[in-house]
Image: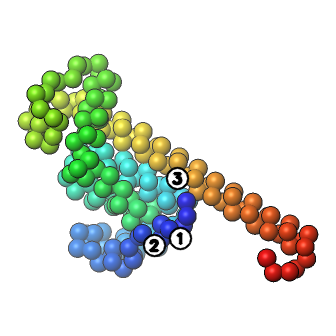
Amino acid sequence: MPKKFLKRLMPDHRVIREHRHLRIFGTLLHDPNLFHLNRRSASGAFANGLFWAFMPMPFQMLPAALFAILFRVNLPLSIALVWITNPITMPPIFYFCYKVGSWLLGVPLHPTDSKFSIEWLQAELAVIWQPFLLGCFVVGVICSLLGYAVVRGLWRLHLVRHWQHKKRERELRKTFGNSDM
């Protein structure tokens, strides 16, 4: 995971501290660990943000921010990852979660005459709430764990390649002397 690339995408920590919706956290936002970018904070932020992205609730960014503060993981990444589920991606993602929950509970899918949409979800929620919420939770946990493992693995791979590159440079300097490489 290129640290410089991620740092360019993240907003300045002062902007986050002064954001009107995040001011409720007060001095908790002054912890420098919330804005550091290392393997632990990035992988934890992916786990946190991906989990909350799959929770069917309004203002998902607030619990994502709260748990980023509690777990002391990267706050901007946690909040940004919640937007995986946005008004465009919500219907297919939540329908998939519903299908997973139905499969896990062994109940048939509730028939629908139209495409899955937020309106359909609101109208049918009394019937489908159990498989829907179970599916959202299970998919959220699985994506969270996968996100954590993938980021840890990619970060480790990047470091190993960096170390190998440095080792080759040292060997070349030894072989050819101290000439400019």
**Residue positioned 40% across, 52% down in the render:** 48
- The residue that label 2 is drawn on is 8
Task: Say which element carries label 2.
Answer: helix
Residue 109 shows in the view: yes
Residue 93 is left or right of residue 43, and the answer is left
Where in the figure is residue 64, as x and y percent of width and height?
A: 33, 56
SS type, badge 1: helix
Pick whichever, 30 or 1, lies toward us: 1
Q: Residue 178 occupies which quadrant of the picture?
A: bottom right
Query: How many residues crowd around disc 2 within 10 Å: few (fewer than 14), some, or many (20 or more)?
Result: few
Residue 121 place in picture, x, y as percent:
14, 37
Disc 1 crowd, CA 10 A, few/some/many (<14, 14-19, 20+): few
Percent from the top left, x then y, of residue 141? 40, 41
- Distance between mark 3 and mark 2 Cα atoms: 18 Å
Give the vertical position of 127 relative to 20 (above or below): above
Residue under label 3, please give it.
Answer: 151
| Alpha-carbon span between mark 3 and mark 1 | 15 Å
Query: Residue 18: x percent and y percent?
Result: 29, 78
In the displayed structure, would residue 16 be above or below residue 68?
below
Whether residue 133 appears in this view of the structure is: no
